[in-house]
Image (tube, grey):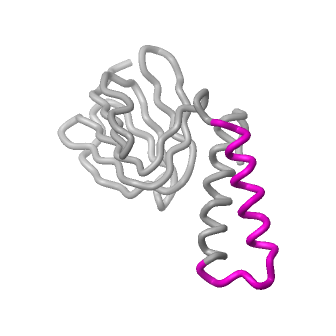
Amino acid sequence: MASFSLKIVSPDGLIFDGQAEKVIVRTTTGDLGIMARHMNCVCPLGMGKAIVEADGKRHEAACIGGMISVVDGEVTLVPTTFEWAEKIDSDRADASYQRAQTVLQNKNSSDTDLRMAEARLKRALVRKSVASGTKY
């Protein structure tokens, strides 16, 4: 299978810089799959599982926010948050999920607190799903 240059850079630094055969990410309008010779594009990222196939191996990650660009065969993924499945702290994701649930169930929560709790809940669900290998 043909490969392409992939660079993944988050606020935490360079995560991946090498050749890949396929990348699948969740954009704000749905999943986007990229293979060699993909047309040029720029898309905003949503929250979801990212799949990177490199060296014949499949790697999964939680990918939240940011953007992806394809320019002249080079793919740059710039997520706000990117965690490889094996590095996700499931206990931390569970705790975040529980805190979000507590805020959402509190009838005295402000609109701002509710919006932030909903986002925290979605992030926790993505992280838990990727860590466990299940679909959320």
Looking at the image, which residue is at 66% across and 76% down?
A: 114
The reply to whether the magenta stretch includes residue 77 is no
Task: Decide which of 130, 109 is in the foreground and name it.
Answer: 109
Which quarter of the picture shows residue 99? Answer: bottom right
**Residue located farthest toward the left when viewing the structure as drawn:** 72
Q: Which residues are magenta?
A: 89-112
Q: Residue at x 73, y 55 (%)?
A: 97
Query: Is residue 105 in the magenta section?
Result: yes
Q: Main secondary structure of the magenta part?
A: helix
Q: Nearest the camera: 124 or 91?
A: 91
Is 120 on the left or on the right of 53, as rendered? Answer: right
- The vertical placement of 84 against 106, above or below, is above
Q: Residue at x 45, y 55 (%)?
A: 65
55 above or below 27? above
Rendering coords of residue 123 (x, y %): 61, 54
Q: Residue at x 23, y 35 (%)?
A: 73
Direction from residue 133 to residue 78 in the image, left or right: left
Measuring from the top left, give residue 62's x and y in whole percent: 55, 42
- Image spot of residue 94 (x, y percent): 74, 47
